[in-house]
Amino acid sequence: MEDSAAKACLLLANGLVFEGKALGASGVVIGETVFTTGMNGYIETLTDPSYYGQIVTQTFPLIGNYGIIPKDFESGAAHVSGYIVRAPCDDPSNFRSAGDLDSFLKEQNVIGLCDIDTRELTKLLREAGVMNGMIISGDGDEAARCRAMLSDAKGRAALLEQIKAYRITNAVESVTGSAKAVEEDAKTVFTESAAYRFVPVRADGTKVNDMDAAMKGGRGKKVVLWDFGAKANIRRELLKRGLSVTVMDSSASADDILAQKPDGLMLSNGPGDPGDNVRIIAELKKILATGLPVFGICLGHQILALAKGARTSKLKYGHRGANQPVKQLSTGRVYISSQNHGYAVETDSLPDGAALSFVNTNDGTCEGIVYTDIPAFSVQFHPEACSGPLDTSFLFDEFVSLINDHGFFRHYKAEHGRIDSISFFAGTIKETKSRWAASGGA
């Protein structure tokens, strides 16, 4: 790592300073200081648009040991505001590596910090909660000015005031469309995924290695992916199941989306406070009124809940990492999930027509909802990620089933007023569905 001896520090909103060494680009940056607990996956973290506006601390000490692998990018660029690691690897070893961490951060103009006690910082954030911070790195003019202010009582107070005033704004608008640079066609996606056994996995754990078999259910169906800062792997998982995917950015209206005549709507992940997306929520309400099947992930899960009348609130330090346990209430099974969110849907605010489907086993927060009055479901975690490593990817198959069974959903709802979506997804009403199909239903 070049200039490894260059000074850098993190100044937190509570006045504490962590002195370390420069990593990546030089300069000064303010962001929301958070931590993520993944032992690997740092490439996906750096390129995940959901980290927009945040200074990300890796709790695992050694980061960068398998280098930078462009094929693993979740978007075309890094989106973190700042990056903190205990010990960066200067000499990565991996046959897929195309470079080292420090060079990548410089290329992406991400200001970083290393050689600090990340364990101490993480414990602090766990106790005090997420707080704003400023990284001051290198010997440039702005860094020198801030470093001088830091050594003076009045200057330090001015810096702290600036840090405390920081708020993430225009988050979704700033990152929508970020994954377009790494998009590939369905055949390429499946072939390359199969080479690493990253193929669709059914709910019973069986892998579908044959492309035609994996895509059979989704062929001929079109999905709009409403991009709030989508991770590239969401689109890949839809393509691997035969669905045709049209990506539309966050500025799209209900009319724009419905004009595509989709068979389903995918609500993506994204950054920021879900309540800030007032226009998107209003447009989604119009779409929900049409009965279009909907699947939401992360921010999409929260926006869907808000559109249905639920509330969201900020978590003390959020859930970020590839080792978050979630329990599926319909089966009692616990899955290990990948997560990245600072807000959650308040379970006690769920309206009639919404049922809790997954909970976080650490703190009991809402991790999934199924809707009994519309053909829709959502999860707070990331089923497209590889935490289990493929435990919850079956939810994409559930989405395909929901699209294919849409006619039955409308038929059943017309007869009974609503449908038990948990049973619907679990397949416990197959007999009713079979009778309906035999009678000529479509």
Image (spheres, helix red, strand yellow):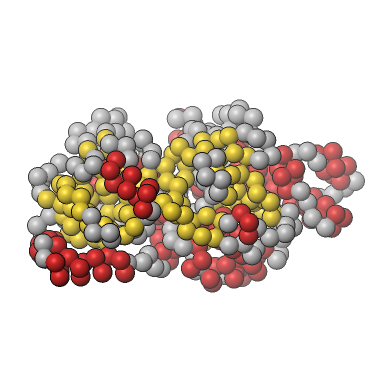
Residue 149 drawn at (x, y percent): 13, 66
Quadrant position of residue 257 = bottom right
Quadrant position of residue 67 = top left
Q: Where, quadrant-wise, is the N terminus in this rendering?
A: top left
Residue shown at the point (65%, 43%) measured from the top left: 398
Would you say residue 170 is visible in this rendering? Answer: yes
Residue shown at the point (41%, 51%) measured from the top left: 317
Given the current orientation, which residue lies at the most extreme right position? 439
Marker count (numbered): 0
Would you say residue 70 is visible in this rendering? Answer: no
**Residue nearest the viewer, comparing 381 with 326:** 326
Residue shown at the point (82%, 43%) measured from the top left: 433
- Is residue 6 toward the left or the right of residue 192 in the image? left
Residue 101 drawn at (x, y percent): 24, 42
- Is residue 19 toward the left or the right of residue 352 in the image? left
**Residue nearest the viewer, comparing 318 with 274:** 318
Quadrant position of residue 133 = bottom left
- Is residue 359 toward the left or the right of residue 158 in the image? right
In the rendered image of this protein, does residue 195 appear above or below residue 241? above
Residue shown at the point (59%, 39%) measured from the top left: 327
**Residue nearest the viewer, comparing 431 with 236:** 431
Residue 390 drawn at (x, y percent): 52, 34
- Is residue 3 toward the left or the right of residue 434 in the image? left
